[in-house]
Amino acid sequence: MQITLRQGERSAIIDTMGGELTSYRDEGGLEYIWQGDPASWTGRNPILFPIVGKLRGGAVLALGKECHMPQHGLARRREFTLIGHGKDWAVLEQREEPDTVKAFPFPYLLRVRQELKENGFTTTATVVNTGPEDMPFCLGAHTAFRCPQRPGESFGDYELVFDQSEDLPALLPTADGLLSRDKTMPCLDGTDTIPLDYAVFDRVDTLTFEGLRSHGVSLRQRNGGRGVRVDFTGWPMLAFWTPPGKHAPFLCIEPWHGCAAFEDETGRFEDKPYAVLLRPGEEWSLGYSVTTL
């Protein structure tokens, strides 16, 4: 089921499959979200839960059991229930089911609030541990922004601009999609800007940053400055991805609380970097916002 939100001339579409915001149009009708294409990537804006990225060997230990999950977890492939909505907001929920417990052995409630704001939207996720055991989990966003956004532009006309100058190198994925702190690439070197180039993603797949000083990053056209700003306050990791070798017209900006497995992880869920551990009955919320420029 799809829900349409409106605020003035701006609109968004929310899909109960995955609970994701699949479209955002500004007052001029310009679409900002990639609409999916089997030739490159059918995704649009999936919610990543209860893992982000790949697991080492496709499995992780939880409650003493080996749990197998696909890349980016379970939530994005499952229906949410619409529990409330207004003209410019919607709240959806997802709970465990018998088949999810086989992969993630915890009762849970994942609540997502999608809301239009002036010149953009916010997405906020709340996780509730509804079971009797401490529950570890990771959470991530994977928003695919159209890039270029307008006719006559190219991917290389755009750049990523951080709120502050940054010195951190990017973590790069290994051949099997894991992370290693020994495999990095300098990207910023004391500047605030990364020019976009398909050749970089053809070579490295994903750029992942850990511990940035900035709380926001803008994807913008170099000359006109048009684009979007993503506020990722509270998210300890941030990744950028477009499918290597496809030269597809989009870039994913991905705030993460968790990440693909590091090669030297213990294998226990609760030891994963940035995994959240909720006690029975506790809840935890985190969101991000997108503003058009």
Image: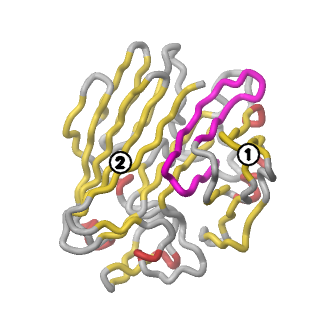
Q: Residues within 10 Å of mark 1 (few under 14, many from 20)?
A: some
Q: Report, in whole angstroms, how far the alpha carbon at label 2 lies from the one at label 1.
A: 29 Å
Residue depicted at x 49% and y 15%: 27
Q: Position of residue 293 (x, y in %)?
A: 60, 24
Q: Position of residue 209 (x, y in %)?
A: 64, 57
Marking on residue 165: 1
Q: Is residue 39 visible?
A: no
Front residue of 140/14: it is 140
What segment is highlighted magenta in the picture? 216-242
Q: Position of residue 251 (x, y in %)?
A: 62, 42
Residue 232 within the segment the image draws in magenta: yes
Q: Position of residue 52 (x, y in %)?
A: 48, 61
Q: Residues within 10 Å of mark 2 (few under 14, many from 20)?
A: many
Residue at image mark 2: 125
Front residue of 126/56: it is 126
Q: How is the image coloured?
A: secondary structure
